[in-house]
Image: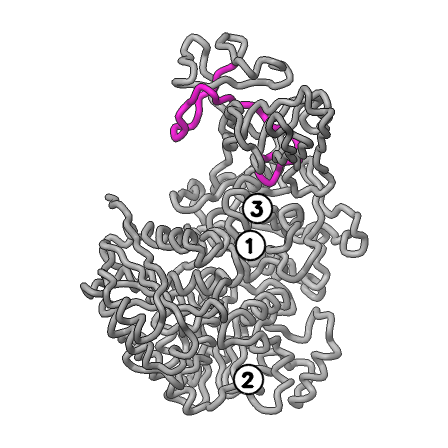
């Protein structure tokens, strides 16, 4: 089923009593239709999003709020004949999350009441939000695409993320117990992707919300319940001192940057375990994300500071970061997953078991899979795969998640590159099976496999978002806690499969994470860490994971259970006797062999004719040719077959073109031809205008490529052969 979309985003009206009169004339408002509204102050770059079935009354309540009345000066109504109450609540919560992450405005909304709501034909209504977003861009209210927003850290860790029922039930349990007891310890278990970090950021934003001037009339039923809990917490702890503890420094710095961009939150709220000693008084509440990464006095590079912190509490070297948090706070919330403990320095599970066995500890658990599109079935499959518990004939199958094994790392990297162009945030990650030579020698190559050469990640903070990340390989320490769209996972030489015993084995001599194996004398203990590492990386990819293994026995085991990547033919060649020119096929041209024939393409059997994808209608000016080299790799992968249309004149500025000139020497494409982005300089003469100079610019991640500059005297034989349409394969 589908229906025609008819979103109406009104012009902005003054946000005052006179403007309210005009708003009341809006047909959606006048007929008390469910609407979403957007209030803003452009000069202050602040905004507020709301929804109501009685917008006139709700907006009047906002105007009666002295804070909102003093901040905002404009309002727009978003209406649609397909809206109902459930839809507007859904669009409101999506707009709050996306606009807060887009960056044009700082939202003054609280995050209370943000819940994922299931309703009749919800899937059918998804395109409504896309259309709303498109309208907001068209009206220049915002500027970033949905893809740009979704790949940002602010979006992924947004405290404005709508919670599912599982998460929301946990929030209510947490708030109830914080209200009920003076000293509360809450322990929340959840496997990878169950939304632990999202829930942690949601909670800290919720409890830090200023509700001093909040009016009951402005909230729905769900919001009122949370607001009452917030009031109770803030009455118990005036000016509450709350901290979000993150043991991993890279993720901590990322979240500090996120918090600095959210109204009501501060980067100083995101702290390391050592920072809990810096306050003169105890924290009212410490929320500990990734608690399984809290450390003990073992295999760490900062033993002096660790020892001093223990001494402050009268502890010997058996003291750990869990002890620090307990001693330096009145209330604690721990988010924990023992399966993501990946280093000997991580506190052993036995310490957390003592907390769980304590009757005073409140125990909750998250079950819903929020990250990977394969859901809990994928999580269970990976766990069974890495613990060798699968049936011998079990092969992963899912229409929602792309899990593939590659015999060739080069093919994996090429396919991952296509996903990077389509979605962004696609990264290669490997086991720590190669020395980190480039840490000291920035010219050194760390990993050479299948004819490819890579360095390990050259930055340790927020590597997944660094400019050169796709050309590097990350490890567990730079990816744990982060979301990727696709992960290219390399099983290193340190992990293998024993065909005789049917078990995973480790080779500690091939494992180069010094702090990861010192003091771990039992290979079974080391294997447990390595299995957790690979499982954790398996869970990074939201849309898919591409797998490659160095050791043949492990490769054979993985291929039994993971579908093998099968390379599709680049293009379907149609036998000439079956060709209907420009009806079922277009010509495939070798531009160097076809020199001079582009202006009048002949229909003859010397050309090969290829079928276009079903969604592209052949046209008489279409042709296909292959583009080689890396000079256009931001748009066109090396070796890709591309669709062009013959140049029909007109402006070409800013377009990607295939050009011919004897003045061109392109190392990638050959003498006389090139594919580049076209820019021209023109001069006006008595006879009209003419080209003065043409610049053909590369669009490459490799900055060594330079533009080809053609001066006036080099343009006599210059010809634009075709204009780029799209990559085909």
Please tell me whether residue 320 is drawn above or below residue 403 in the rendered image: below
Q: Which residue is mark 3?
A: 488
Residue 576 or residue 546, whichever sits in front: 576
Magenta stretch prevailing secondary structure: loop
**Residues at circles 2 and 1 in contact by the CB criterion of under 8 Å:** no
Query: Tag 3 or tag 1, which sits nearer the N-term?
Result: 3
**Residues at circles 2 and 3 in contact by the CB criterion of under 8 Å:** no
Give the number of marks: 3
Cα–Cα span, label 2 and label 3? 39 Å
Asked if residue 345 is among those painted magenta in the image, a careful observer would answer no
- Residue placed at 50% from the left, 32% from the top? 726
Q: Which residues are magenta?
A: 608-637
Query: Tag 3 or tag 2, which sits nearer the N-term?
Result: 2
- Residue placed at 60% from the left, 69% from the top? 252
Q: Which residue is mark 1?
A: 537
**Residue 380 shows up from this direction:** no
């Amino acid at each position: 089923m589908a229906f025609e979309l008819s979103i109406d985003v009104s012009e902005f009206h003054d946000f005052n009593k006179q403007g309210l009169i005009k708003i009341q004339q809006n047909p959606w408002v006048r007929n008390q239709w469910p609407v979403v509204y957007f209030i803003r102050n452009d000069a202050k770059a602040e905004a507020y999003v709301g929804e109501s079935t009685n917008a006139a009354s709700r907006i009047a309540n906002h105007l009666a709020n002295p804070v909102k009345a003093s901040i905002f000066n404009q309002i727009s109504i978003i209406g649609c004949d397909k809206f109902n109450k459930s839809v507007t609540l859904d669009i409101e919560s999506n707009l709050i999350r996306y606009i807060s992450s887009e960056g044009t405005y700082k939202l003054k909304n609280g995050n209370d009441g943000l819940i994922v709501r299931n309703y009749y034909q919800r899937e059918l209504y998804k395109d409504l939000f896309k259309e709303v977003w498109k309208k907001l861009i068209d009206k220049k209210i915002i500027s970033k695409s949905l893809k740009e927003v979704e790949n940002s850290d602010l979006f992924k860790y947004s405290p404005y993320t709508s919670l599912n029922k599982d998460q929301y039930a946990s929030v209510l349990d947490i708030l109830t117990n914080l209200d009920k007891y003076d000293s509360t310890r809450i322990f929340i278990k959840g496997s990878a992707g169950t939304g632990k970090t999202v829930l942690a950021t949601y909670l800290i934003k919720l409890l830090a919300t200023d509700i001093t001037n909040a009016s009951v009339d402005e909230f729905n039923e769900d919001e009122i319940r949370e607001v009452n809990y917030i009031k109770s917490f803030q009455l118990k702890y005036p000016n509450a001192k709350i901290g979000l503890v993150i043991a991993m420094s890279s993720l901590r710095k990322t979240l500090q940057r996120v918090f600095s961009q959210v109204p009501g939150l501060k980067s100083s709220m995101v702290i390391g375990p050592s920072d809990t000693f810096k306050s003169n008084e105890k924290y009212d509440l410490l929320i500990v994300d990734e608690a399984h990464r809290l450390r003990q006095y073992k295999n760490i590079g900062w033993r002096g500071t660790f020892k001093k912190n223990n001494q402050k509490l009268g502890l010997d070297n058996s003291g750990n970061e869990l002890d620090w948090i307990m001693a330096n706070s009145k209330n604690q919330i721990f988010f924990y997953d023992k399966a993501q403990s990946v280093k000997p320095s991580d506190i052993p599970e036995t310490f957390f078991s003592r907390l769980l066995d304590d009757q005073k500890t409140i125990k909750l658990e998250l079950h819903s899979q929020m990250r990977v599109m394969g859901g809990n079935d994928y999580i269970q499959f990976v766990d069974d795969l890495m613990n060798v518990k699968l049936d011998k004939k079990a092969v992963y199958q899912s229409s929602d998640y792309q899990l593939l094994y590659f015999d060739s790392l080069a093919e994996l990297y090429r396919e991952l590159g296509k996903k990077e162009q389509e979605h962004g945030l696609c990264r290669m990650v490997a086991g720590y099976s190669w020395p980190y030579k480039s840490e000291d020698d920035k010219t050194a190559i760390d990993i050479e496999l299948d004819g490819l050469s890579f360095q390990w990640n050259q930055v340790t903070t927020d590597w997944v978002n660094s400019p050169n990340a796709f050309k590097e390989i990350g490890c567990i320490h730079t990816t744990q806690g982060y979301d990727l769209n696709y992960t290219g996972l390399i099983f290193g030489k340190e992990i293998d499969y024993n065909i005789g015993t049917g078990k995973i084995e480790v080779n500690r001599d091939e494992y180069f994470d010094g702090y990861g194996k010192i003091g771990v004398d039992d290979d079974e203990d080391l294997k447990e860490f390595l299995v957790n590492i690979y499982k954790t990386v398996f869970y990074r990819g939201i849309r898919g994971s591409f797998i490659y293994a160095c050791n043949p026995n492990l490769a054979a085991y993985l291929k039994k259970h993971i579908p093998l990547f099968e390379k599709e033919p680049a293009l379907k060649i149609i036998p000439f006797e079956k060709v209907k020119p420009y009806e079922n096929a277009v010509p495939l041209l070798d531009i160097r062999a076809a020199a001079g024939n582009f202006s009048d393409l002949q229909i003859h059997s010397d050309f090969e004719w290829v079928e276009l994808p079903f969604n592209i209608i052949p046209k008489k000016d279409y042709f296909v040719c292959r583009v080689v080299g890396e000079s256009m790799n931001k748009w066109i992968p090396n070796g890709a077959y591309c669709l062009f249309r013959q140049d029909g004149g007109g402006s070409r500025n800013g377009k990607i073109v295939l050009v011919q000139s004897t003045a061109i020497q392109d190392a990638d494409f050959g003498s006389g031809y090139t594919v580049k982005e076209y820019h021209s300089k023109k001069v006006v003469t008595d006879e009209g205008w003419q080209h003065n100079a043409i610049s053909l610019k590369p669009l490459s991640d490799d900055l060594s490529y330079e533009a080809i500059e053609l001066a006036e005297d080099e343009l006599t034989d210059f010809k634009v052969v075709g204009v780029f349409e799209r990559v085909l394969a």
